[in-house]
Image (cartoon, rainbow, N blue to C red):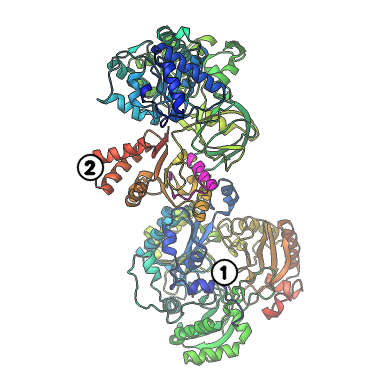
Amino acid sequence: MLLKELSSLTSPLSEPQLSTLQLALNDLSPTQTAWVSGYLAGISQASGGQVQAQGAVSQPAQRVTILFGSQTGNAKGVATELFEQAQAQGIAARLVSMADYKAKELKTESHLLIVASTNGEGEAPDDAVTFHEFLASKKAPKVPTLKYSVCALGDSSYEFYCQTGLEFDERLAALGAEAIVARADCDVDYDDAVATWSELALAAVKATLKDATTTEAPSTAVASTHVANTYSKKKPFKTELLINQKITGRFSDKDIRHVEIALEDAGISYQAGDALGIWFKNDPVLVDAILDQLELDGAETVTVANETQSLRDALINRFELTQSYPSFVQAYAELSGSKKLAKLLDDKTALRNYCYGRQILDVIDEKKAKLTAQQLLSGLRKLTPRLYSIASSPNEAEGEVHLTVAVVDYQQSGEQRIGGASGFLQRLEEGAEIEVFVEHNDNFRLPSNDNTPVIMVGPGTGIAPFRAFVQERDVREATGNNWLFFGNQHFTDDFLYQTEWQDYLKSGLLTKMDVAFSRDQAEKIYVQDRLRENAAELYAWLEQGAHVYVCGDGDRMAKDVNEALIEIVAEQGKLARNEAEEYVAELRRNKRYQRDVY
Amino acid sequence: MSDIKLAVNERIKTESNLLRGTIAEGLADQITGGLSDDDMQLTKFHGFYQQDDRDIRAERQKQKLEPRHSFMLRARVPGGICTPQQWLEIDRIASDLTIYGSIRLTTRQTFQYHGILKPQVKPLIQALGSVNLDSIAACGDVNRNVMCTPNPVESALHQEAYAWAIRLSDDLLPNTNAYAELWLDGEKVTSNEVEPMYGPTYLPRKFKIAVAIPPHNDVDIHANDLNFVAVGDNGKLAGFNVLVGGGMGTTHGDVNTFPRLADDLGFVKPEDAVEVAKAVLTVQRDWGCRTDRKRARLKYTLEDNGVDKFRSEVELRSGIKFAVPKEIVFTTRGDRFGWIKGVDNKWHLTLFIENGRIVDTETHPIKTGLVEIAKIHQGDFRMTANQNLIIAGVAEQDKEQIERLARLYGLYSDELSQQRLNSMACVALPTCALAMAEAERYLPSLVTKVEVLLAKHGIPEEHFVMRMTGCPNGCGRPFLAEVGFVGKGPGKYNMYLGAKNNGMRLNKMYRENIGEAEILAILDTLIAEWATNGLSDERFGDFVVRTEVIKPVIIASRDFHG
């Protein structure tokens, strides 16, 4: 919007005020305008006034835009911290979610820092899908003056590690932009890598942002939709485990638990759809097995993050032991001289397959090695908290947060292996202390309109957020129809929260529920089969504006459900395959199709 | 009567569209493993009850899981006889379609399955149908499985009596097509379907028929609503003495309920049996109490109207006059274990199946053993009223092989005491919804302790008829036991004494709500006295009456609680 176009009809200013403003700004250089914009924003914030969205004026001046694409909240967290650091350094900056970013703004940017996570199979996170598509399309403009850097978050145990960040990087480069700092690919324990990248990126921005050093102005910020939590991943809330109840029957092959955690008076808030981060401790039995195998003394003192502690305590509290990862395989291959491990390093696919399902102990078991405590620790990843979709609505479970946790328990080379966080929760007794934090997930929200119908697909522990949704719809007295799809192995022992669903069906809150128990008959039946059986009705719901939510396994289930949706739309809407795909893509763009998959 | 409310089940039957209810919809409901309350009453007419595993009910409530619902289905096997081919399928069904994988021989000469999950009910009934078995009217307010002394020795008389048992069972079946529609994919009846004999509300309560062949009273005639006691004439069937109004079921603490001996109506010729049965059934249909299910059995109709009035009505409706009853003598109720040779020169092996429970255990793989026998057996299988099994009709040359298999699989041993052979329990916990205490799972250990007492007092070969049930409804016929136990609460029983060994006199409560220690203390004293002071051949039930340990029950309505 240009100054000459300003009018009292489109701004909150009166005609005389506008004239004065135009007069004052007429002959300012772009740099001066940038300074003034920051100055005015500072005044606005200092006076406690709310910036009206309708009054926002795009900034012709130089500043850095920090753009994030986040699925579970990690990328958003990194971007927010980066934004705060920029502010602290006096760099003009703004923070925007890719979901809210207008693609045409791209050509007006001078500096862009992108923080992007990657979904399971190399897909962009839901809130980045539109912008990601835009960049890849012919509509994307050339941006020869743009300076940028990308921080990619990922998990090196997946095939398409940091894929989305990589694609943003490659695409921006192809459009002519200049990478001022090389892309950082950050693994699950990303804190150190992110810190390094942030420092370099901000320094580079500061060096190239015109007149940035002369400005003292505070920068503008995108208003957060959340009341800031006092607690965070780095500063978790210490609270109490209230209930730890197995909710699979005694004949089940699975141990799935309903966990209730106290949140009372905690300055920690959540909404249905959010996730809860759990800081866990490793099983002392596992730690002792590792120490035994390496013939290390657990009492030996080590220094980790400037804290001196016993090796045993450090392994219990600080390091990732219940997964294995390429970096450790590499380190241990060198230390042990294992030919088998060394050979794996040459083949990424084989290495990834090897890591899958193996824990640190399995890698160590490959070959005896004599190594020091410090050598061991330097090969290990820092322990990272695990996220669980919250299974309660804060308005129903007042002062509590509920989770649905499947205990990861499997055989590897004839030995039992237990998941890190799930095993911790399994061992934890009611009343014990636990450290948690909330990860908001705006990509998984009930429709704001309570009349909107909702279709929920949540097999296994994917049921968790839908327990929260249904509780929330109940509390809100939402009138929209609710249809729940659930699946698991056996009806008699794996029907999670069965009696609660029965009550909701009886009360009428749940309009419909369809279940698929895969192992109760010769042929396997899954939720996507139930979707197909209900194709006509499901399509009718979609046409009536229903929102679709999918939660659970991302590797197979979410893909199968997605495929079923496309087929249903094609068949019922009499559409060609590509039209049906577009129909579903449109649902996703309109946030009517949201997924929380892992 | 109009101001007294009909029992709830009367409404359910009336609205059921001849036993259909909403069973089909209930089967299709994926969210629960159970059926609606109304349908649960109706499925009984199709042969099955809804139950749940009571051992884990509380645990599952915490797990936010509904009770582990399953169904108990009872087959209709008149006279308890089936072929080896049928047995193989009966066995396969237990393994493939039930969660417990067991077969239970019942006290009414049939078998039942426990732990059938809802989706398996229909396949199971169809599988039974594939070998010409069904479960129609095996439970419910109708005539149930017709019993018949499985006497393999006097074969000619048994053959005739058994044929009448089958006739009675078939002719008294409900007419509704509901069973075929629901379970066998039969075509839907759209025209005005009627129940010519039962009417739309069937009977007020269950109705049990037995055909007895003296001197064996294994079918316990006084536990049945209607009995046909075969009267032989030189090995041929001359006719039946008809007795009505026996029954076991009572309610704890309700003196208006009591077990009752059957009354003699008189003698009829064989060909009149079915008409008489229909007349008895319709009189009960019209006169029986429909306001209080605890007072709805035929025994109370007899009690309230008197036997003479009842007999006149039956004669009027059937057009058949009763003759004076023939002299009959019953001597035993127990089965004759081991090999017996019949008049047709075939051999018959009676196997003791403790509490009728057929399941493989490490030491006694009896379920597999019966399959192995069924594979080679040329005769038939006969389920007895004492929950045992007869391998009947074995040719001389096959005898050795059958015995070898029976011994190999722990089905046949010489070590069982008379006391164990004459003890019986119902299923009770964990599946039966009515049970207040253990029965089947507990009785075997109690028998062991009683054996010790009998040995201690020098009479290890002796026995008394001992029966235990988890509730007072009487499936195990506890009120006709010389020593009866009826569950009152966990580990607690009412103890009854004084029935006749041959089932011709009821027992009476001796102690209320006692546990094992007290039970054993009482038996220790009484067995000691019986061993010392009992007359020659005096049975235990007679001894405790003669020595006034307990008063005899002569007229049940007066003496059982008196």
* Chain name for mark 2: A
Give the Cα separation between the discs numbered 1 and 2. Answer: 77 Å
Q: What amino acid is at disc 2?
A: Ala
Q: Secondary structure at mark 1?
A: loop
Q: Looking at the image, is A473 positioned above or below residue A380? A: below
Q: Out of B548 and A26, give the one closest to the viewer.
A: A26
Which quadrant is home to the C terminus of chain A? top left
Could you tell me which residue is drawn at 38 percent across and 77 percent down? B193
Crowd tier of the residue under label 1, counting other residues whose Cα lies within 10 Å: few below 14, some 14–19, many 20 or above: many
Question: Which residue is label 1 attached to?
Answer: B334
Image coordinates of residue B508 in percent, x first then y, are 70, 72
Q: Out of B31 and B3, give the one closest to the viewer.
A: B3
Camera sees residue A414: no
Q: Looking at the image, is B412 positioned above or below residue B285? A: above
Which quadrant is home to the N terminus of chain A? top left
Question: Which residue is label 2 attached to?
Answer: A576
In the image, the segment drawn in magenta is A465-489
